[in-house]
Amino acid sequence: MKRVAVVGGGASGLMAAYAAAKNGNEVILFEKNEKLGKKIYITGKGRCNVTNDCLPDEFLRNVVRGAKFLTGAIYSFPPQKLAELLESFGLSLKTERGNRVFPVSDHASDVTKTLESACVGVGVSVHCNEYVTKIETINSNVCGIRTNLGHYPCDCAIIATGGLSYPATGSTGDGYRFAQEAGHTVTELKPSLVGLNCGGDISAVQGISLKNAVLTAQRNGKVIFSRMGELLFTHYGISGPLVLSLSAEINRIPVRELSLYLDFKPALDEKKLDARLLRDFSERKNEQLKNVARGLLPVSLALLVLKRAQISPTKQANAVTKEERCNLVRALKEFPIYPSSLRGFEEAVVTSGGVDLKEINPKTMESKKIKGLYFCGETLDADAYTGGFNLQIAFSTGFAAGNSIK
């Protein structure tokens, strides 16, 4: 039996504490907030998208960084095993669009309660309102931790403190400091799964959402992202699932080096779209363009597209020249977006960057530098797209860390 200190009571910490304690270890879980799982409460808009019900191969294709490192952990503790475990604790689950898994109750709090109950059931001692200040080592071995309330000897310390995203939940980067103090490399930290600030006249269409737009990003003339999905125009720029996925791909690139384009009509190529415009203009030849364009896009967006195409919205449809029609087709198929920066950590779903994976054992999550020191969840330099993938990474790496201590 070993004495194990788990630092952080979020998804990865709760799973690590449970897995370590079920092996017969003496486990203390430290959470600096007044309650466990504070970030879990806000995931999935308060419903908690626990995981994604897909096979490991597909899961790993949705990992942006760290897929190779995570392969063992995801295969050992895949979404199906997580679901079975949670349901064995009494949490009923359901699968929705995109294989997203939620509690039947639609209450994220039920996920936290279930995990807390599981931990207490295997003897985990939970210390809320107590924060760890230092991981103590002797001869490159963990020997104890210090908190604001005292000193605790231990054989192992599992760091599950989260990243920098949503700092109001307590994710203030403590784990990265512990890692650096232990001699670990922490890669550059960036917000991920977050909206983009944009310049230009885009604020004129705030509040409009699109279901099936294609967003393309180019850098130095090379396409680095092109995908169809849902997009939302906001007061600051653009957001929505499509933009969140883009942010995961580009957060380590200077945003101003990117060229972004929207295709509002991906189902039509330029020739078919031109034919559609010709038909519409012919059928409504005596109407102003701003009225005809309503059949293509929401009013304010149609006006912005006409402005970008340099066509007067009051021009009659039968007066549009071939050159103007070509400009309109181009504006509909390659509408430029001018990004200035990513939104901040306070809005980011996850943190991109973290403890360098080369310095961590992928089977056990143990440090290769300090014996008895483990990292899991968002502290690691591994992240994925939206859809339950990041929470599963937290659960899988937490389980790997806790379960390896025997």
Image (cartoon, rainbow, N blue to C red):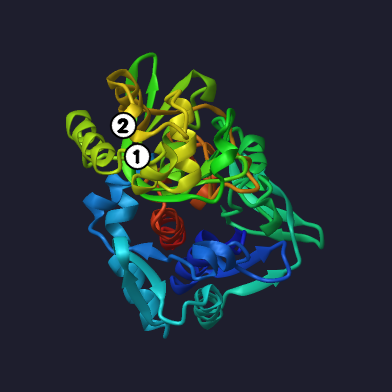
Instruction: Look at the numbered disc 1 and give the secondary structure of its residue.
Output: loop
Which residue reaches farthest top?
220
* Image position, residue 174 (x, y; %): 67, 47
Q: Up-down: is 257 above or below 19?
A: above
Residue at left offset 48%, top offset 38%:
303
Residue at left offset 34%, top offset 53%:
73
| Residue 318, numbered label | 2
Q: Up-down: is 122 above or below 133?
A: below
Residue at left offset 52%, top offset 79%:
110
Q: Nearer the viewer, residue 383 or 161?
A: 383
For residue 30, say whether it is visible: yes
Q: Nearer the viewer, residue 40 or 296?
A: 296
| Residue 286, numbered label | 1
Q: Residues within 10 Å of mark 1 (few under 14, many from 20)?
A: some
For residue 193, say whether it is visible: no
Judged left or right of residue 348, residue 260 is: left
Judged left or right of residue 176, residue 238 is: left
Indicate the amino acid at tag 2: Asn
The answer to whether marks 1 and 2 mark residues whose Cβ atoms lie closer than 8 Å is: yes
Whichever of labels 1 and 2 marks the residue nearer the N terminus, that label is 1
Q: Up-down: is 359 above or below 83?
A: above
Quadrant assignment, res 63: top left
Q: Up-down: is 91 above or below 357?
A: below
* Image position, residue 341 (x, y; %): 59, 30
Quadrant assignment, res 173: top right
Indicate the amino acid at tag 1: Asn
Q: Quadrant of the C terminus?
A: bottom left
